[in-house]
Amino acid sequence: MKSLKKTIFFVALSCVFSGAALAQTTELGVNAGAAGYIGDINPTNLFKPSGVAFGAYIKRNFNPYWAVGIHYNYGKIGGNDANSDDLSLKTRNLNFSTSLNELSLQVDFNFLDYFSGGGRTNFTPYIFAGVGGVLFNPKAKYNGETFELRYYETEGKKYKNYAMSIPYGIGMKYRIGERLGLFTQLGYRTAKTDYLDDVGDRYPASSVISPASSKNPGGVNLSDPSVPRYPGDPDRPNFLPGGQRGNFVKNDTYFFVHIGLSYTFTSDKCYSF
């Protein structure tokens, strides 16, 4: 009997300190959705998805409010001047697409006492921010041929195919089981580069022409594909060397909109008798 009382006492004591015991819980998650970008080829539409996205993370919940996680996200973004309502952009005739591979460290803050860190509520809005890095490789397609633009130096300068990124965003988490959660999220990233789309500065002194190929016997003017404007049109540039090719914003932005599932490796229930 005395032994049973001791057992009950220690179990009760562990429940009293369950906040400390549950304060650090590991969480895994997967997500899928769409990606988009704001930059020189899409300068004004802040929410225009252009490709698929998916990702995964591992996170440590220190308490019901704060968590830190390592996140991997993949997405496809793109843009095409031909689809713009702006006549000057249509004339410019640039396009691009690229895959994004992002790895980041993010901090979450839950506004409510959410269960994954030992909390009591079944849902919470949350915000997040962090720091990361992204790999990219812009490509353009003209007359059925795809060009990896970074290797052509279309503005007469080199740039790296990776950059630092600053993620930030908002979301909502919902509890759907003892250890399962559902979440939605919209997150933007400021990339410390202006060349996610291969466009950032001015037209070069000499246009960059691609090598001749069966699809493009005369090559393609990758710096200024606005010419020729129709078959037989003289190769007269619409834009002069040194003229502004991109906009004046020095950092491109991309975003992910996700829905996902999370699994937490600690139950928030104490023992019952």
Image (spheres, helix red, strand yellow):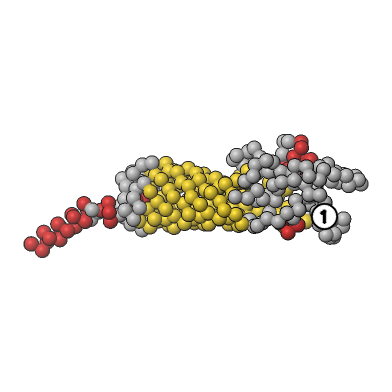
The quadrant the N terminus occupies is bottom left
Crowding around mark 1 (Cα neighbors within 10 Å: few <14, some 14 to 19, many 20+) is some
* Residue situated furthest left in the rendering: 1
* Rendered residue at 58%/55% (across/down): 134
Q: Nearer the viewer, residue 207 or 189?
A: 207
Q: Secondary structure at mark 1?
A: loop
Q: Amino acid at mark 1?
A: Ile
Residue at the top extreme of this rendering:
86
Left or right: 258 in relation to 84: left
* Whether residue 79 is visible: yes
The residue sitting at 35% across, 56% down in the picture is: 25
For the image shown, how many numbered marks are present on the structure?
1
Residue 31: image location, x then y, percent: 50, 52
Q: Locate the C terminus by quadrant.
A: bottom left
Residue 82 visible, this angle? no
Residue located at (86% from left, 46% from top): 228
Residue 139, compared with residue 112, is above or below; it is below
Residue positioned 52% across, 48% down in the render: 167
Residue 254: x and y in percent read 59, 47
Would you say 143 lies left or right of 201 here? Answer: right
In the picture of the structure, the residue carrying the numbered disc 1 is 209
198 left or right of 62 in image: right
Q: Is residue 258 left or right of residue 213?
A: left
Percent x, y for residue 142?
78, 52
Q: Position of residue 214 (x, y in %)?
A: 85, 60
